[in-house]
């Protein structure tokens, strides 16, 4: 699937490996890069669902907002612009890297 990083600070983090806004541990940074690669490698939404470690889920209260797990506390939040009626393929817009409490 196509992945776009809409958040300029996250784009800076992805390109340069650092950002003034996101001062995160190396483990989270490594998982951030791996998460983006897994999203890019997915052919459809089913590839994300069947990878249990991602914990891919729809965010409650938001239309077309989803997240994947980077660690137990950190999530990568995204919007998906669906390209088919079945909602299996789409363009992923990375929106935010957030600390998530409670699982």
Image (tube, grey):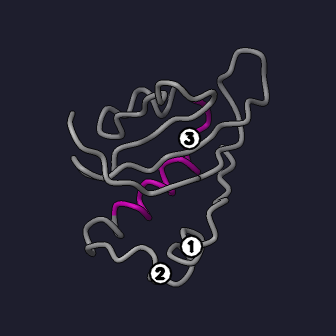
Q: Is residue 79 left or right of residue 90?
A: left
Question: Which disc is residue 19 wearing?
Answer: 2
Q: Is residue 101 above or below residue 71?
A: above
How much space separates mark 1 and mark 3, taking CA atoms? 24 Å
In this orientation, which residue lies closer to the viewer: 89 or 63?
A: 63
Residue 84 lies in what quarter of the image?
Answer: top right
Please provide the residue range marked out in magenta.
31-45
How much space separates mark 2 and mark 1, taking CA atoms? 6 Å
- Would you name the residue on which mark 3 appears? 42
Q: Judging from the image, what secondary structure is the residue with disc 3 in?
A: loop
Q: Is residue 40 above or below residue 6?
A: above
Q: Is residue 38 left or right of residue 8?
A: left
> At which x and y percent is residue 98?
39, 54
In this orientation, which residue lies closer to the viewer: 89 or 70?
A: 70
Q: Judging from the image, what secondary structure is the residue with disc 1 in?
A: helix
Residue under the image location 43 percent in, 29 percent down: 57
Residue under the image location 34 percent in, 34 percent down: 55
Please state the total of marks drawn on the protein image: 3
In this orientation, which residue lies closer to the viewer: 54 or 64?
A: 64
Using a 10 Å C-alpha cutoff, classify the residue at mark 1 as few (fewer than 14 neighbours), some (14 to 19) or many (20 or more). some
Q: Is residue 102 left or right of residue 95?
A: left
Q: Judging from the image, what secondary structure is the residue with disc 2 in?
A: loop
First in sequence: mark 2 vs mark 1? 1
First in sequence: mark 1 vs mark 3? 1
Q: Quadrant of the N terminus?
A: top right
Q: Residue furthest top?
A: 86
> At which x and y percent is residue 27?
25, 68
How much space separates mark 3 and mark 2, taking CA atoms? 27 Å
Question: Which disc is residue 9 wearing?
Answer: 1
Using a 10 Å C-alpha cutoff, classify the residue at mark 3 as few (fewer than 14 neighbours), some (14 to 19) or many (20 or more). some
């Amino acid at each position: 699937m196509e992945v776009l990083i809409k958040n300029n600070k996250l784009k800076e983090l992805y390109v340069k490996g650092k950002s003034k806004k996101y001062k995160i541990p190396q483990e989270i940074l490594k998982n951030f890069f791996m998460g983006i690669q897994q999203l890019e490698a997915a052919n459809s939404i089913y590839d994300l669902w069947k990878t249990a470690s991602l914990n891919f889920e729809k965010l409650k209260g938001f239309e077309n907002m989803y997240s994947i797990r980077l660690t137990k506390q950190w999530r990568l939040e995204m919007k998906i612009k669906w390209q088919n009626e079945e909602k299996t393929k789409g363009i992923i817009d990375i929106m935010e890297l957030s600390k998530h409490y409670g699982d």
